[in-house]
Amino acid sequence: MKMNEMTIEKVARGHVQKSMAYDLLNGHKIVFCDYIASKRYYAQYIDSFLSLFARFEQEGLRIKMEMGKYGGYWTATAMIVK
């Protein structure tokens, strides 16, 4: 098992977090709205993403997050800083 796969299994909970973690670990800049399947559960998704980022930080990976166009999370972006 590669380091990225071990890290994903350790920090990600559920398929949405695993998808986001995979993209982050492969150097992509992610946009939150691309991972939110239903606006009805927007707040729960944001809490989930922030929890994922906290677990990344516990593993020693820094996440740089920029708030969206109007200061919200819908178009917020995140990426791993090396």
Image (tube, helix red, strand yellow):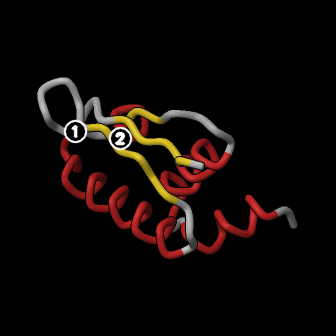
Nearest the viewer among 32 and 54 is 54
Q: Which mark is residue 36?
A: 2
Q: Is residue 37 left or right of residue 26?
A: left
- Cα separation between marks 2 and 1: 7 Å
Note whether 3 is above or below 73 in the view shown: below
Instruction: Tell me the residue at 56%/69% (across/down).
Output: 60
Nearest the viewer among 80 and 15 is 80
Q: Secondary structure at mark 1?
A: helix
Q: Is residue 4 left or right of residue 74?
A: right
Residue extending furthest toward the front: 82
Q: Amino acid at mark 1?
A: Lys
Q: Is residue 58 left or right of residue 10?
A: left
Instruction: Tell me the residue at 51%/63% (across/down).
Output: 14
Q: Residues within 10 Å of mark 2 (few under 14, many from 20)?
A: some
Note whether 81 is above or below 33 in the view shown: below
> Is disc 2 in contact with disc 1, using a CB cutoff of under 8 Å?
yes
Q: Which residue is mark 1?
A: 39
Q: Which mark is residue 8?
A: none
Q: Position of residue 64 (x, y in %)?
A: 41, 47
Q: Secondary structure at mark 2?
A: loop
Note whether 80 is above or below 55 in the view shown: above
